[in-house]
Image (tube, grey):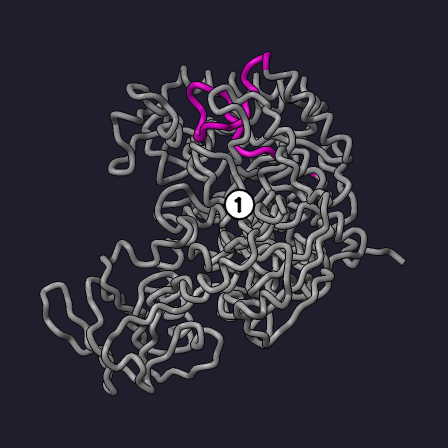
Amino acid sequence: MPLTKYPHVYQPIQVGSMTMKNRIQFSPIVTNHAGYRSGRVTPELFEFVSAQAKTGAGLVTIGSTPVNFEEARDFFGCLSVTKDDDLPGLTMMANELHRYDCKLSAELIHGGQWGALTLPEGRQAWVPSVVEPYHDPKRIREITRAEMLTVIDDFVSALKRCMASCFDMAMIHFAHGNLMSAFLSTMWNRRSDEYGGSEKNRWRFPLELLEAAYDTVKGKIPLEMRVVGNEHMPGGTTLEERIRFLKEAQKYIDMIVVSAGNLMFGEAFSYNMPGYYIPEGVNVPYSAAFKEALPDLVVSVCGGISTLEMAEDIIKTGKADIVAMAKALMADSEFVTKGARGLEKDIRPCMRCMYCLKRNNNDCHIAGCAVNPPMGWEYRRSKPVPALKKKKVMVIGGGPGGMAAAQYLTQRGHEVVLYEKSNKLGGRLNEASALSFKEGFRRYFEYTVRKTNECGAKILLGKEVNAETVKKEAPDTLIIAVGAIPVMPPVKGIDGKNVKGVSEVDRGEAETGRKVVVCGGGLSGTECALSLAMEGKEVTVTDMIPIEKFYDDISQFNKPTLTRLLADNNVKLMPDCTVSEFTADGVIVKNKAGESVLLECDTAVVAFGVKPDVKLIGELNEIIPETYILGDADKTGVIGDAIGRAYWLTRDI
């Protein structure tokens, strides 16, 4: 009897001349681990790519690899395949992946308009057409025919170096508004020569490139191509046209990877890396359409696919041949291996919160997943090291940080006792996972509570801790992870019967009427407002901050979608208003002009934020010499901040 419940996921597949051991691809991501200016393979990149292979994935595709390091980059810290000096590092990396029977590919790209992000002052990025107001003519210009031939030569040279370095495959990036994608687009390509206008003219240069690429690799390594199912922008090409193009292109390629979106136009940006507001498997309908129209082409699909159950269903039903994942594989560095061994219950779920991209920009490499803090830091000894001296550690608080601390400490061999004043573990995860659009949070909540209960720590629920409790327990080390308390300003009527706390509302412990005013425009308040509006309630959110500061604590990748969802559900935002009184009829606010306005409602929800309980922390902080303050008790933040602090703190205890 096979150990795995996912036979279709773990079935090998032939892609051109290459055989993948399973149907999971580590989707190309930008990590910035390579040499910042040189693009060389660094120890940091080597260890990160090795960790990608250790997940058990059958294929790793390294993201955003420019074919010309002067003209084609869209990020710093990206991998170079542009110089013969790159070959030793590339070969070493390929050999490392082959140790794990994992295939290696590189996402070859010409950034086009996105090259303006990396080119020095005075240099212009190349585009099919300058489209104002989106393009600044000082930074961007139309590519010439001679430069188009240079681009083809650059792709050919990059492909030759990939083959010389023992790469198993190479990807040509035709998505997200880069140079090749832009030639296909009715939005970005407005040329009047033979490379613009009709769809066949817009296809001309991309097909010339694909033919040259095919002639270079034919019979040696297969080619994959990244395409979009939906550009999610005005003037984008239709699915039907993209299928027609692929029918022409398929003679040159072996596989497509279906993505979505564009790096411009607000929410189109979010669809490149969909967070928890965007449905899981958002691109699967497009991959299914491609698969039906192009049955001989191997189709891989990415986009919010977080579980093996979903991957199995996609492949079993023929909607794609391969499933490409990134965030889920970063959340658990043994994701695929655990599923193969029948250990799927031990897979650490991805919350789709986008915390992994919090620091990933041109100035810093990807560093830390909300639920897997060492991700991105593999070169810094990511696995827990047994403690040299076993200690008794008392953890006060069973929220995300406290639970993580208990798990990490017991892994290292310490004796742990965890106190939680409520009758259940979870802390802020109880309300954070309650909203309907936070399915990933619920999966992680259930997982980490179970893992905490199983980790070997002594867990005492319903036990409020004071100084005497600590003295009686007499730990060697004390971790204070008591969370934070709601900010309750001295506003008249705030204790009224029609005034509820945001946490109680999110958890379903406090009912609201049909008409609701949420006081607080941060992420907590606006997500509560969205949830209530999705139930059909009439909701207004008010805050003293300007409109551009509303839910400013959200990931940049999630913000456009939240903005759209609030509008779609008729949530009214009232900035520049100070709450002055709660009454039986509603909330009285003072606007920017100094006028008092009554916002009529059945229920007011207070979401003024949280703050550390200074009194309690002060009482507990001076009893045990080795004491640490963790999570919101130290500094209010998001769940990933607390778990990350717990990981790095407990490594040194």
Quadrant of the rendered image containing residue 386: top right
The residue range painted magenta reads: 59-85
Picture residue at 61% right of the left edge, 46% below the top = 330
> 123 above or below 631?
above
The question of residue 337 being in magenta is answered with: no
Residue 406 x, y percent position in the rendering: 64, 58
Residue 517 x, y percent position in the rendering: 29, 75
The question of residue 60 being in magenta is answered with: yes
In this rendered view, identify the residue nearer to me: 519 or 81.
Answer: 519
> 84 above or below 1?
above
> 49 above or below 39?
below
In this rendered view, identify the residue nearer to me: 501 or 230.
Answer: 501
Tag 1: amino acid: Ser
Residue 65 x, y percent position in the rendering: 53, 28
Label 1: which residue? Answer: 259
Picture residue at 50% right of the left edge, 55% below the top = 629
In this rendered view, identify the residue nearer to me: 652 or 31.
Answer: 652
Picture residue at 29% right of the left edge, 30% below the top = 130
In this rendered view, identify the residue nearer to me: 561 or 612.
Answer: 612
Query: Quick one: label 1, few (<14), some, or many (20+) residues within 10 Å?
Result: many
> SS class of the residue under badge 1?
strand
